[in-house]
Image: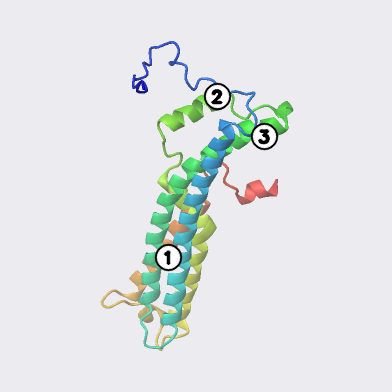
Amino acid sequence: MTPPSTKEIDPSDPDHRDVGAGLLGEEMGPGSAMAHLYRGEIHRMKFWRERLDRTTNWAVIVISAILTWSFSRAETPHYVILLGMATLSVFLVIEARRYRGYDIWRSRVRTLQENVFAYGLDPSAGVVDPDWRENLSRDYRTPTLKITAEEAIAHRLRRVYLPLITVLLAAWLVRITAFAPGSWTSSAAIGRIPGEAVVVVVALFYLAATVTAVRPRTWYAKGELRSLDLRD
């Protein structure tokens, strides 16, 4: 029996150099390679979405435990809540990094939805991006992050972390006022650090988080639903 040929494919061979050129033709139906590509991107986007939710769940569990502990006994120091804010900040940075990875797959999904499936449902509306094939091909060859770390942090602050930080801030204010024997400025002190300095640092931290979340900017995250979009 003659063994199968093990000859390598020559890219310069006219019979092989156009392999894949018509793989994603416009006439291909929903059972084609395009549908399998879309299904794969949906799966990867779902996987990264679950990673985001996992970090959020841990953040909620941690602050719930901290609030329960801080109000369980009068002698529990108030700065336990501030440690909770620091912990939330760590979770925020981790989740923002994951969000940037998640946005890679979501941007591909939105490109296919806008220019393939939406166009197939209503060809009269045309495609959103005439160069979507070239752009998507470039992104498959060299995957790149589409948004900055600052925008990712702003997204997660708006959706999850700014409300959580607000809850911790309100709990801390109650802890150093209603549950403290002396004045709130003296109650806010941490060791040799005066209470006024602690209050200023906490206020600046919350102000920075609020400004990062709500300041006007151009959003580059593709397909992210915001309150302004929902009004339409």
- Inter-mark Cα distance, 1 to 2: 47 Å
The first of marks 3 and 2 along the sequence is 3
Q: Residue type at mark 2: give it.
A: Asp
State how the image is colored.
rainbow
Identify the secondary structure beneath mark 1: helix
Pick out the residue farthest to the top: 14
Question: What residue would you read off at disc 3?
Answer: 118
Give the residue at x 57% y 46%: 224
Residue 3 occupies quadrant: top left
In this view, the mark in front (3 or 2)? 3
- Inter-mark Cα distance, 1 to 3: 47 Å
Pick out the residue farthest to the left: 192
- Inter-mark Cα distance, 3 to 2: 16 Å
Q: Give the side of residue 190 with respect to residue 205, left or right.
A: left
Question: What residue would you read off at disc 1?
Answer: 203
Q: Position of residue 152 (x, y in %)?
A: 46, 49
Seen from the viewer's position, the closer of residues 50 and 153 is 50
Give the residue at x 57% y 32%: 34
Q: Residue type at mark 3: give it.
A: Ala
Question: What residue would you read off at disc 2?
Answer: 131
Q: Give the side of residue 213 with respect to residue 97, left or right.
A: right
In this view, the mark in front (1 or 3)? 3
How dense is the environment of label 3, judged by Cα within 10 Å: few (below 14), some, or many (20 and up)?
some
Image vertical order of residue 53 relative to residue 77, above or below: above
Q: Give the side of residue 68 with respect to residue 36, left or right.
A: left
Q: Disc 1, disc 2: CB below 8 Å?
A: no
Q: Residue type at mark 1: give it.
A: Ala
Give the residue at x 44% y 66%: 58
Q: Position of residue 205 (x, y in %)?
A: 40, 62
